[in-house]
Amino acid sequence: MFDSTKIKNKNGFTIIETIVAIFILTVGIIACSILADQVFRSSATAKDRLIAVNLAQEGIEVIRNIRDNSWLASDSTWKDDLPVGDWELSYDSSGVSDTYDGDYLKVDTDGFYNYLLGSDTTFQRKITISHIGDSEIKVEAIIYWVTRGTSKSITIVEYLYDWK
């Protein structure tokens, strides 16, 4: 004969099966949201680090440009326009004149970083110049910034020589 009790037990889920399924689904959703948050944090940190590296490299390039312009001017030696000290330089600086005060860089509407115009950023740039001898200068570009409440910095060191 036909047993109706077996059919009733197979028709639906028990309350325990439902709770287990909801638990597994909840754990999966929470894991996905934590992973997404970590991806967003990592991308913000990577973006700020990339900007910092480029700002440091730009600082070195500004010093090279000042050195090259000194070579072109016959009235000075190659390192006369690069005095020892800590400096703040923008991409368009033609000389070393602003001592480092810890000012924050600004970004203008064209995307250029400077100290005069634009929106404030969390980046500070310090250029340190040291004379090592008659034919060598050490240039250190240090960028300081804050990402998600954590202070960070990056340093690039370059040695410039009197090769002319």
Image (tube, rainbow, N blue to C red):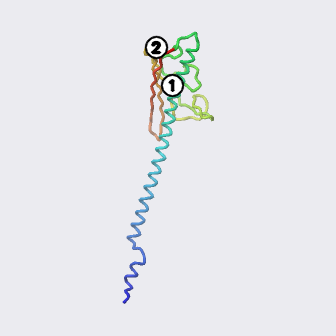
Q: Is residue 66 above or below residue 9?
A: above
The N terminus is located in which quarter? Answer: bottom left
Nearer to me, 53 or 18:
53
Q: Residues within 10 Å of mark 1 (few under 14, many from 20)?
A: many
Q: Residue 160 appears at what percent x and percent y? A: 47, 19
Residue 27 vs 14, above or below: the answer is: above
Residue located at (58% from left, 14% from top): 72
Q: Residue at x 56, y 19 (%)?
A: 95
What amino acid type is highlighted by mark number 2?
Ser
Q: Choose the circle earlier in sequence order: 1 or 2.
A: 1
Q: Examine the image and state in which quarter residue 138 appears.
A: top left
Q: Position of residue 116 (x, y in %)?
A: 60, 28
Q: Nearer the viewer, residue 135 or 129?
A: 135
Q: Amino acid at mark 1?
A: Ile
Label 2 Cα neighbours within 10 Å, binned few <14 / some 14-19 / many ≥20: few
Name the residue beneath numbered marker 2: 135
Mark 1 → mark 2, Cα distance in angstroms: 17 Å
SS type, badge 1: helix
Left or right, residue 112 beside residue 17: right
- Spot the residue most to the right: 109
Do the residues under discs 1 and 2 have CB atoms within 8 angstroms? no
Looking at the image, the residue that sits furthest to the top is 75
Hey, which residue is sitting farthest bottom in the picture?
A: 1
Q: Is residue 148 left or right of residue 108?
A: left
x, y percent for residue 37: 47, 49
Q: Position of residue 90 (x, y in %)?
A: 56, 26
The label number, if any, that marks residue 60 in the structure image: 1
**Viewer-side residue, 120 vs 56:** 56
